[in-house]
Image (cartoon, helix red, strand yellow):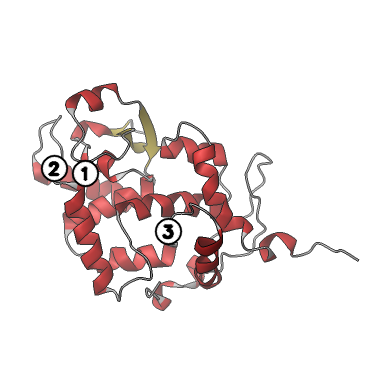
């Protein structure tokens, strides 16, 4: 990547991981902070040595892109992909009724749609399974609610009436504005980045798979290669003598 948001690599980012005590977690890290620069430096090795490994961004890079995005609609689309792992087709199918606030939690109900050319048909929307993804960021919750209020959308109307290709062209221009990248970044890159971000924080593989709407955890396991490529995180403290 050419995106080097050094200003984003703050102590808060570098001290983000906390100890995990759940024995069911895929990875139970110590209190060691995530070394974003190290993981960014190791990414070319991951992409070069792991078959079918998708290109991905790490948190400082995503934040740099989000900070550069000034258009409120596109910023909201990017935020939703980054914080929910939704496919772009699923985001573009959202309506006001997709968002749920029961007084305790705020989240979004996504219709699990595989990427296909064009917009999802009404029949595809009707037969698609659904999944619930919590949205914990209070500022994002407020921006979603403000966007819905200002848009005066009908309850079943799509809140982002545009095509996937339009979003991807916008992302390409956004990446160029921040200096370009060593690989192609599309809307789906945010989905891959979401999955890897959760695994880096030790979240269970099964839960990540459910959030992504995968039918099988086999589809999710590809992301674990980001963990295993950095042997130092696993072998540190293991005595062979």
What residue is rendered at 25% in x and 48% in y? 142
Labelled disc at residue 177: none
**Front tag of 1 and 3:** 3
Q: Secondary structure at mark 1?
A: helix
Q: Please name whichever residue, 47 or 160, is drawn nearer the observer in this view of the structure.
A: 47
Rounded to the nearest whole Å, what is the CA distance between mark 2 and mark 3? 36 Å
Dot 2 or dot 3: first in sequence order is 3
Q: Are marks 1 and 3 in contact (CB under 8 Å)?
A: no
To which quarter of the image does residue 54 belong?
bottom left
For the residues bearing labels 2 and 1, Cβ distance under 8 angstroms:
yes
Q: Which residue is mark 1?
A: 145
Badge 3 is on which residue? 55
Q: Going from the N terminus, do you reach mark 1 or mark 3 first?
A: 3
Around disc 1, counting alpha carbons within 10 Å, would you say few (fewer than 14), some (14 to 19), or many (20 or more)? some
Few, some or many C-alpha atoms within 10 Å of disc 3 (few <14, some 14-19, many ≥20)? Answer: some
- Residue that appears at 65% across and 39% down: 24
How far apart marks 2 and 1 lie (CA) works out to: 6 Å
Q: Quadrant of the C terminus?
A: bottom right
């Amino acid at each position: 990547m050419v995106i080097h948001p050094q200003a984003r690599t703050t102590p808060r980012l570098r001290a983000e991981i906390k100890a995990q005590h759940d024995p069911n977690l895929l990875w139970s890290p110590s209190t060691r902070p995530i070394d974003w620069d190290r993981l960014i430096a190791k990414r070319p090795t991951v992409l070069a040595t792991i078959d079918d490994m998708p290109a991905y961004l790490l948190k400082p890079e995503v934040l740099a892109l989000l900070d550069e995005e000034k258009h409120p609609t596109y910023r909201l689309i990017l935020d939703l992909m980054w914080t929910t792992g939704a496919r772009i087709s699923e985001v573009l199918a959202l309506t006001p009724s997709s968002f749920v606030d029961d007084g305790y939690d705020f989240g979004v109900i996504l219709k699990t749609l595989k990427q296909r050319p064009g917009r999802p048909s009404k029949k595809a929307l009707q037969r698609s399974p659904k999944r619930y993804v919590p949205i914990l960021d209070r500022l994002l919750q407020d921006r979603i609610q403000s966007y819905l209020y200002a848009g005066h959308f009908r309850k079943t109307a799509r809140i982002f009436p545009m095509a996937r290709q339009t979003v991807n062209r916008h992302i390409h221009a956004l990446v160029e504005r921040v200096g370009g990248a060593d690989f192609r970044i599309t809307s789906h890159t945010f989905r891959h980045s979401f999955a890897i971000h959760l695994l880096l924080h030790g979240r269970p593989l099964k839960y990540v798979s459910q959030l992504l709407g995968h039918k099988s955890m086999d589809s999710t396991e590809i992301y674990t290669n980001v963990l295993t490529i950095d042997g130092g995180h696993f072998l540190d403290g293991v005595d062979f003598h």
